[in-house]
């Protein structure tokens, strides 16, 4: 790949579709600064009335777990079925539980 | 489990490869090339229709067309965004485009001669694109598949507005009907070529299918497009320019005439009527905008210094 | 593997919770009574709606000319959004002009079949941009003025015009933000961008005089509380522009703005003739055409 890099940094965009929902990652864009990133996110990702709130964050500021961490991070919670309500058997005759 | 095995298992189980997963170099390269070409096609694809925005003959059509061409810019960005998750850089991809080192769909190298072309591009070109793209919503690379879902949803309006325009024009004056027929005649064969060379001449298809980057062959998709489009042409009252086009009851598909592949090769290799102009326009915008992008970056850098 | 039905698949992705995808579009004029307010001269209201509608229509045309030419693809989207907002305002205002006139002309007849001398836009809207700096400088001037105007117009006596203005306030606020952001970035950015943006301000700001000249139609309607006298917008306008220029390290030209507004009476430059030739050519060349 050539040495020419894009002039503006990459930002990740998160949109809250409506009140009561989490912000969801929708993609990325290029912007020179945070204010521009918000404007661009509005123009790019909410053209169809899709959002009520936007977060932007510099892509390089995102710290992510890697695929190599998968086992150490996520496997240990896999055997703890007692955290789930369906682990416990309660007779159908008992109401509201 | 080795990295290769883990990759193969994800593909095998029809799950998605995500950006930080290990992937074969060939997969990464193929993916970047395919997504970048797709992104370039969206951006170059703004030009043929964009030329009619200022000349649209009603304010409603003007708004629709401006929104549609804007969507294409958006789709280009969704796709560049997906390519960047693979380590590509948009500035670099743009330079590859304007230096002619990466391709875009050759369909956009044809001129748009009348306003009926706006309708026919929506109906046939976007219709063909949708046929190509819907299976890509299940492409094995997660960010690409997700971009395609969004794009396909948004493009359903593109096809419908085109068909609606043609229906309206067919109800208009004889001159308008003639514009529609002429546009259909010019765009039909190029639309069929959008699906790429026949399977026998498509060397990359097998690997792309194995990696689930592609889900159907070129010929399968082309047949599907023809089957969907013929009844639409009948409803519109236009004749598709192919004397060999007829229903084959045995195959349960429409047969259609032989495609002039020499023309496709000529257009792909950069010899289309508008190739030089399309690239020149993109390059001009990139060059004219350089001082603006640079100024914004300089301003941002100064503000960071002030804050620190 | 089964073959996707391309069209089925477009509608049966039941993933709206995961994929933000908008619904709930609204009609800005839903429930707004369309009767003309008592005592208002039809011709005056029609002319006033044409003034504000033509401003939007013609500036939108200039923005449309930027499509595929913006400095960055993200800005393609931003400029298209602004162009669409203005086009939407123009359509509503031309439609209202046709209603007020009462001669059965709709938005398209008004947009496509009037000659340059019948257009009532300010000249600021029609001039061509030499570069991106002029685009954003003009947009800053135009939207700062229009926002101040719509803010007040939203509380005036024609329910349709007031509703259009109320909707427009939200749109034009964004346009002003976008333009101001760029004027600041370019003014403060590099030596080159500073020089170009100062040059743009030097050209564009002196054209702002016409924005504050009250036309007799505006004066008559303002007395009935159906229009806004633009003379009253000057202080707010000057304030906002001064703030933006300060942050952008730019200076306002000392050259005074001419205090006349020929565009409001249909007196335009050659640039409007060019715009209309492009905009109206096809519609006029296809008599009886339906689109």
Image (cartoon, coloured by chain):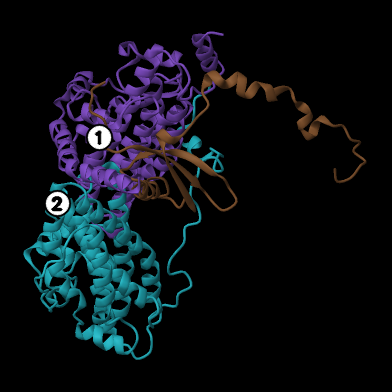
Chain colours: A brown, B purple, C cyan
The residue that disc 2 covers is: C131
Mark 1 and mark 2: Cα distance apart in space: 35 Å
Give the chain letter at badge 1. Answer: B
Q: Are marks 1 and 2 on the same chain?
A: no
Count residues near mark 2 (Cα–Cα under 10 Å), then give few for <14, some for 14-19, many for 20+. some
Position of C273 relative to B70 (above/below): below
Quarter holding the C terminus of chain C is bottom left
Position of C184 relative to C13 (above/below): below
Horizontally, residue B122 falls left or right of residue B134, namely left
Foreground of the two, C45 or C182: C182
Residue mark closest to the camera, 1 vs 2: 2
**Quarter assignment of residue C68:** top left
Foreground of the two, C243 or B193: C243
Horizontally, residue B183 falls left or right of residue A19, namely left
Secondary structure under tag 2 reads loop
The residue that disc 1 covers is: B187
**Residue C102 appearing in the image:** no
| Residue drawn where x is 46% and y is 18% of the image | B212
**Quarter assignment of residue C42:** bottom left
| Residue drawn where x is 34% and y is 23% of the image | B32
Point out residue C65 in the picture as x, y percentages from the top left corner: 19, 52
Number of marks? 2
């Amino acid at each position: 790949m050539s040495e020419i890099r894009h002039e503006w940094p990459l930002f990740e965009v998160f949109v809250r579709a409506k009140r009561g929902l989490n912000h969801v990652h929708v993609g990325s864009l290029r912007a020179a600064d945070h204010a521009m990133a918000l404007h661009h996110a509005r123009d790019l990702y909410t053209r169809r009335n899709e959002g009520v709130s936007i977060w932007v964050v510099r892509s390089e500021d995102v710290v992510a777990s890697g695929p190599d961490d998968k086992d150490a991070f996520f496997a240990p919670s896999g055997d703890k079925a007692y955290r789930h309500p369906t682990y416990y058997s309660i007779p159908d005759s008992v109401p509201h539980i | 489990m080795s990295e290769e095995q883990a990759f193969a298992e994800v593909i095998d189980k029809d799950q998605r490869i995500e950006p930080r997963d290990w992937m074969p170099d060939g997969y990464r390269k193929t993916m970047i090339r395919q997504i970048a070409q797709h992104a370039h096609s969206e951006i170059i694809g703004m030009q043929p229709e964009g030329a009619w925005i200022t000349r649209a003959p009603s304010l409603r059509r003007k708004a629709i067309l401006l929104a549609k061409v804007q969507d294409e810019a958006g789709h280009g960005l969704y796709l560049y965004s997906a390519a960047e998750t693979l380590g590509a850089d948009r500035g670099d991809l743009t330079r590859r485009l304007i230096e002619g080192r990466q391709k875009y769909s050759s369909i956009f190298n044809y001129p748009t001669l009348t306003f009926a072309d706006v309708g026919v591009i929506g109906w046939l070109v976007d219709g063909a694109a949708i046929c190509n793209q819907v299976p890509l919503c299940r492409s094995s690379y997660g960010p690409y598949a997700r971009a395609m879902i969004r794009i396909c949803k948004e493009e359903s309006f593109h096809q419908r507005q085109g068909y609606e325009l043609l229906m309206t024009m067919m109800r208009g004056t004889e001159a308008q009907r003639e514009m529609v027929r002429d546009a259909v005649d010019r765009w039909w064969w190029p639309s069929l070529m959008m699906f790429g060379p026949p399977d026998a001449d498509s060397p990359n298809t097998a690997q792309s299918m194995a990696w689930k980057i592609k889900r159907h062959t070129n010929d399968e998709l082309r047949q599907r497009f023809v089957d969907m489009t013929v009844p639409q042409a009948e409803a519109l009252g236009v004749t598709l320019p192919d004397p060999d086009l007829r229903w084959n009851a045995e195959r349960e598909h429409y047969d259609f005439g032989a495609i002039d592949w020499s023309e496709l090769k000529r257009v792909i290799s950069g010899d289309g009527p508008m190739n030089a102009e399309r690239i020149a326009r993109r390059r001009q915008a990139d060059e004219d905008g350089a001082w603006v992008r640079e100024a914004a970056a300089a301003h941002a850098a100064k503000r960071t210094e002030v804050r620190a | 593997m089964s073959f996707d039905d391309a069209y089925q698949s477009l509608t049966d992705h039941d993933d709206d919770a995961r994929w933000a995808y908008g619904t709930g579009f609204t009609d800005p004029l839903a429930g707004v009574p369309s009767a003309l307010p008592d005592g208002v001269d039809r011709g005056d209201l029609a002319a006033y709606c044409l003034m504000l509608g033509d401003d939007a229509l013609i500036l939108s045309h200039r923005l449309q000319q930027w499509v595929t030419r913006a400095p960055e693809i993200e800005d393609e989207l931003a400029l298209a959004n602004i162009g669409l907002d203005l086009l939407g305002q123009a359509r509503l205002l031309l439609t209202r002009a046709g209603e007020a006139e009462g001669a059965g002309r709709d938005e398209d007849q008004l947009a496509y079949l009037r000659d340059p001398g019948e257009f009532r836009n300010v000249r600021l809207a029609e001039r061509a941009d030499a570069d991106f700096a002029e685009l954003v400088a003009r947009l800053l001037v135009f939207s700062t003025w229009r926002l101040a105007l719509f803010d007040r117009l939203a509380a005036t006596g024609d329910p349709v015009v007031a509703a259009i203005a109320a909707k427009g306030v939200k749109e034009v606020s964004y346009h002003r933000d976008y333009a101001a952001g760029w004027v600041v970035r370019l003014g403060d950015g590099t030596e080159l961008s500073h020089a170009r943006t100062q040059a743009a301000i030097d050209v564009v700001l002196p054209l702002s005089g016409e924005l504050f000249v009250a036309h007799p139609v505006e004066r008559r309607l303002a007395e009935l509380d159906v229009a806004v006298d633009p003379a009253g917008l000057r202080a707010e306008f000057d304030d906002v522009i001064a703030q933006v220029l300060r942050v952008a390290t730019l200076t306002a030209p000392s050259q005074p703005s001419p205090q006349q507004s020929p565009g409001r009476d249909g007196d335009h430059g050659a640039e409007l003739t060019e715009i209309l030739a492009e905009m109206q050519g096809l519609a006029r060349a296809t008599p009886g055409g339906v689109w």
